[in-house]
Amino acid sequence: MENSKNNKHIRKNFAHIAWEEAFLWEGCPLCFLINKTLWKTEDNFLYELVNDPKTRERIRKGNGFCPEHAIQLLNFKDTLGISIIFEDLIKNVIVPSLLKKNLPEGINCIFCEKEKEILNLYLSTLPDIFIDEESSLLWKEKAYSFCLPHWEIIKKKLPENLLKFIEAKDKKKKYPEYLFGSPLWDKDYSILFLKKIRIRGKNEF
């Protein structure tokens, strides 16, 4: 970008480094960041927060999990942690509601909230990515295009000059290998990402 010449040595925070990692992924960079971060959040939840009273209360008040995130939790195959959470929901939410003949209306899933937080975090740091010369080059030469749902969100958040910069790169027609919202939870992100690095790695530029 035009003003990147004056910003060759921008100090990179964790989000900036994460974006550069995502640019090496063969798919929508924002899908990668959200899925990877949410996967870590869900894994941490099953490992450390299943018996946390405040977390359990939040889940009860929210009437459990949305179908998408419930399936993602099941894919971790942590039968003990999952059984504890669902037993608690059955005893304290579902059964009392059935007895009162008043089924809960609506679900306020804690992972849906977390997903929105992750999205907003990375979108807020995206303008800095394209100011940095090294990151801009990485985007132009390595990254895949954003998926259409995320591109629609980005268009509402970024200034016009940055949108033009992104659109200019999209002339390369690099399409993601998977779609927004697809269930990727059977993949081991650490192994898969390291494989991508070896194939398309930093030694190439």
Image: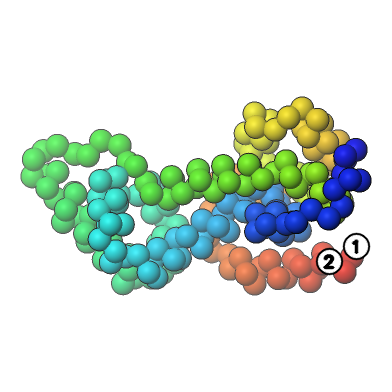
Q: Position of residue 205 (x, y in %)?
A: 90, 62
Q: Is residue 26 left or right of residue 186?
A: right
Q: Is residue 4 visible?
A: yes
**SS label for mark 1:** loop
Q: Residue at x 83, y 36 (%)?
A: 165
Horizontally, residue 129 falls left or right of residue 89, namely right
- Color theme of the render: rainbow
Q: Looking at the rendering, which quadrant does residue 54 occupy?
A: bottom left
State left or right for residue 52 relative to residue 165.
left
Q: CA distance from mark 1 to mark 2?
A: 6 Å
Q: Quarter holding the N terminus?
A: top right
Q: Quadrant of residue 23?
A: bottom right
Q: Which residue is pictured at 72% across the width and 70% down the height? A: 195
Q: Secondary structure at mark 2?
A: helix
Q: In front here: 52 or 108?
A: 52
Relative to 177, say whether 104 is above or below. above
Residue 21 on image: x %, y %: 72, 59
Of the numbered discs in the image, which one, if any, rests on residue 137?
A: none
157 with respect to 84 (left or right): right
Three-letter amino acid code of the residue under disc 2: Lys
Q: Give percent across and percent down for residue 113.
A: 43, 45
Residue 202 numbered tag: 2
Quadrant of residue 56 within the rendered picture: bottom left
Quick check: marks 1 and 2 in contact, CB under 8 Å? yes
Image location (x, y in percent) of residue 90: 20, 55
At 75% from the left edge and 47% from the top edge, which residue is drawn?
Answer: 129
Q: Which amino acid type corresponds to the residue marked 1 in the rendered image?
A: Phe
Query: Residue sitting at 79 percent across and 44 percent down?
Result: 130
**Residue position for label 1:** 205
Q: Nearer the viewer, residue 91 or 130?
A: 130
